[in-house]
Amino acid sequence: MRYTVYTMTGIAHISRQVNPQTTQARIFGAARRLFDRDGLEGLSMRKLGDAVGLTPMAIYKHYSDKEALIDALMLDGFVAWEARVRRIRVKNPVGWVQVLLDNFLEFALSEPRRYEAAFLLPARKARQYPDDFSAGRSPVLNMVYARIEEAQAQGLVNGTSGVEIALHLSALGQGLISMHRAGRFVSEKEFRATWRRAMDRALGSFFGISPEEAP
């Protein structure tokens, strides 16, 4: 079967089947590499076309615009984050939440571009507070809610809703990480110490118990 390939120098006709998924995967892989290297500012359709040997019009067959690529990068970041969370094996619910927060910190420090993609990109499909939070559209937040409900059943929660607890911890964590990324701490050691104090106080304010005291 003959098909058309749009290249930077013209149009070529090749007699074999095209696999659209393979082309789309190549485009996304190149977009991710550009993003990882230069951030969102370095991701342009021209640069992407040069990287994969396609014209912008050919790319638009797979991603309608740059915003669609940003959505894909965001979802890719969330996949990486969710995979970390699903590996948590702590039994008690308060301790589980503490380990989740520790993982959030390590995710931001060890995979900064995946963290940025998941939580900082201006993606059209980004979940919004409060509707998406309350509707359970986040797999990770659903796991958080389940642990909070478990803690409630054990009498460990002070009555604050799971949505409010998740919002507070998310805002606190992302705020501290943004300060660190902007160089507002004298060292990573100081940042980590501040993170631990802030998170322990937040957990204590909601659960009324330290993670070490949880059953």
Image: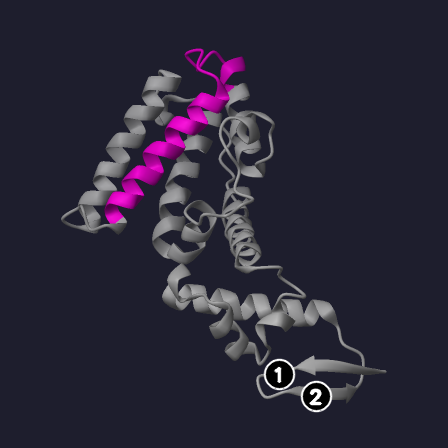
* Residue 20, quarter of the rendered image: bottom right
Q: Report the span colored magenta.
A: 151-180
For disc 2, the neighbor class at 10 Å (few under 14, some 14 to 19, many from 20) is few
Mark 1–mark 2 distance (CA, rounded to whole Å): 7 Å
Which sits in the foreground, 74 or 42? Answer: 42
**Residue 192 lies within the magenta run:** no
Type of the residue with mark 2: Ala
The residue at the point 45 percent across, 11 percent down is 159
**SS at circle 1:** loop
Give the percent coordinates (x, y) of residue 37.
Answer: 39, 68
Q: Is residue 20 above or below residue 188?
A: below
Residue under label 2: 12
Q: Which secondary structure dominates the residues rendered in magenta?
A: helix
Can you see residue 215? no
Q: In screen coordinates, is 27 left or right of 171?
A: right
**Residue 159 lies within the magenta run:** yes
Residue under label 1: 7
Give the percent coordinates (x, y) of residue 100.
Answer: 44, 38
- CB-based contact (under 8 Å), mark 1 and mark 2: yes
Quadrant of the image containing the C terminus: top left
Can you see residue 180? yes
Give the percent coordinates (x, y) of residue 107.
Answer: 40, 50
